[in-house]
Amino acid sequence: MNSIDQSQVRKILCGRRDAIADSWYRAITQVSCASLPAEEVRQQLVGLTEQAIAVLVTEPFEDRKAQAIGVALSQLPCTQSEVLGRSQELLAYQLIRDLPVDQIVALQPRLVALIGAVAVGFYQQIRETIPV
């Protein structure tokens, strides 16, 4: 992805940041988090959305930053495996939704890496928290 495409994609995604975070909140509260203060969790998800956007469009791809999103997600007071699954589904969809096809194609390998690294970070943190 060239720098012009990166800045254009970043601008589009940052403009949708709050909508992505709201969708993410709704997706995970369907499986968990129902008793948590909505604004608190939503603000955490806004921050994680910003991090995901940055990882997705910044060169080089930084696996550890993507894993940090998974770690933070696992620390929400609603950690269930369904939260990770819903998060992966939602991010994969929302981060490329309505982008031009050429940008989706360019982002696809990075999106796969992002989703995988989020899962790794989530799993590692849960494993450290709850010894297997």
Image: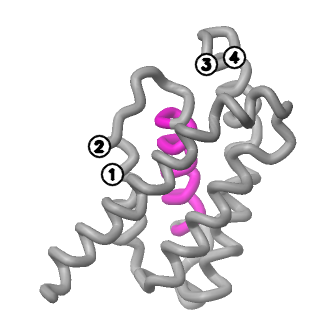
Above or below, 122 against 99 in this view is below
State left or right for residue 20 relative to residue 54.
right
Q: Position of residue 113 (x, y in %)?
A: 46, 46
Relative horizontal placement of residue 80, taking residue 82 as reference (left or right): left
Q: Secondary structure at mark 1?
A: helix
In three-dimensional space, the C-alpha distance between marks 1 and 4, rounded to whole angstroms, equals 25 Å
Viewer can see residue 83: yes
Q: Quadrant of residue 31?
A: bottom right
Element under disc 2 = helix
Dot 2 corresponds to which residue? 64
Q: Nearer the viewer, residue 21 or 52?
A: 52
Circle 3 Cα neighbour tier, 10 Å, few/some/many (<14 / 14–19 / ≥20): few
Kindly report the distance in space between the C-alpha atoms of the residues bearing marks 2 and 1. Answer: 6 Å
Which is more foreground, mark 3 or mark 1? 3
Q: Which mark is residue 68?
A: 1
Q: Measuring from the top left, give residue 67's x and y in whole percent.
A: 34, 52
Q: CA distance from mark 4 to mark 2?
A: 23 Å
Determine which residue is flagged by label 4: 5
Residue range in magenta is 41-55
Q: Which residue is mark 3?
A: 1
Q: What residue appears at the point 57 percent right and 64 percent down from the top-left corner?
A: 88
